[in-house]
Amino acid sequence: MHLRWRLAVPDPQEEALCAWLEARGSSAFYREADPPRACYAYFPPDREAPDPAGLAAFPGVDLLEAEPFGDEDWLAKSREGFGAFEVGARFHVRPLWDGTPGPADRLDLVVNPGLAFGTGGHETTRLCMALLEELATAGRLGGPILDIGAGTGILSLAAHLLGGRALTAFDIDPDCGPAMEELIQLNAHLLKGAKPYESFVGTLDHPRVQGPYAGLLANILLETIQELLPRMAEVAAPGAWLVASGILAERTDEALVSLVSHGFKPVKVLKEGEWIAVLAERVAA
């Protein structure tokens, strides 16, 4: 029998909990886009679910339901809780099993909810997409652009659809390699044969990272941003923009100080729920 956990998860615990569940056999994890925004974790029949007592390590996380189900119910259960939604002023996001296109005045993105981070449903992704819309309006997506910790590649895809060019997306997680390729296939209806970004699995020190870049995307955890800022400053051209998120609002001051200390001048901060995204610019040396 398959097993599905439905969980109440405070935003600050989501990333760590997802990693904990994946390490213990979860085959998929996602959060509902609409209230109450429950989280779901799935365990295949050949893996024993972890002891729920381990959830005590994550303050505020509560296991609401543990539901076993058979193979015949897998598809239906995996699709519950993830529906279509709008992001920013330009985007409509729907799961791959929803065949209903979005409004004609919006870009209709198709995603595959799963372990690779980046379906558009999380506040940080939505905030980054909103900042990309502003950069597009200002004519600043000409590239080259580097997407650091790209997950599924949704931000690179959004940037391309907004007019961005010369995009490179990468992530250290091996699962993200196939996910980035799949996202391109799922959105062939928008791309019309164009390849929105080059992608690879690796780190910021990979040989394929070749600046200077006119723009950087970093929707990752603040601790990781802080670790990578020296290298990000090296590959960013003078005046380059940086969209950074994965930052809890309670750590806004810390994030801004870190950016300034590495040569990035904060220009704008957007907030949604407990999260923020920052638009900053590389100060000329």
Image (cartoon, helix red, strand yellow):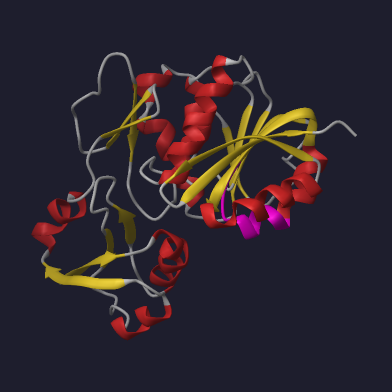
User: Residue at 52% of width from left, 52% of height from top?
Assistant: 249
Residue 101 magenta:
no
Judged from this view, the residue extending furthest toward the right is 285
In the figure, 141 relative to 109: above or below? Answer: above
Visible residue check, residue 179: yes
In the depicted view, which residue is nearer to us: 140 or 94?
A: 140
Q: Is residue 77 left or right of residue 173?
A: left
In the figure, 237 relative to 233: above or below? Answer: above
User: How far from the left and from the top, in percent, is residue 192?
Assistant: 41, 16
User: How far from the left and from the top, in percent, is residue 187?
Assistant: 37, 28
Instruction: Please give the range of residues in magenta.
Output: 218-227
User: How far from the left and from the top, in percent, is residue 258?
Assistant: 73, 52
User: How far from the left and from the top, in percent, is residue 137?
Assistant: 55, 15
| Quadrant in the rendering for residue 69 | bottom left
Task: Tell me the quadrant of the picture where the N terminus can be found.
Answer: bottom left
In the depicted view, which residue is nearer to us: 152 or 276?
A: 276
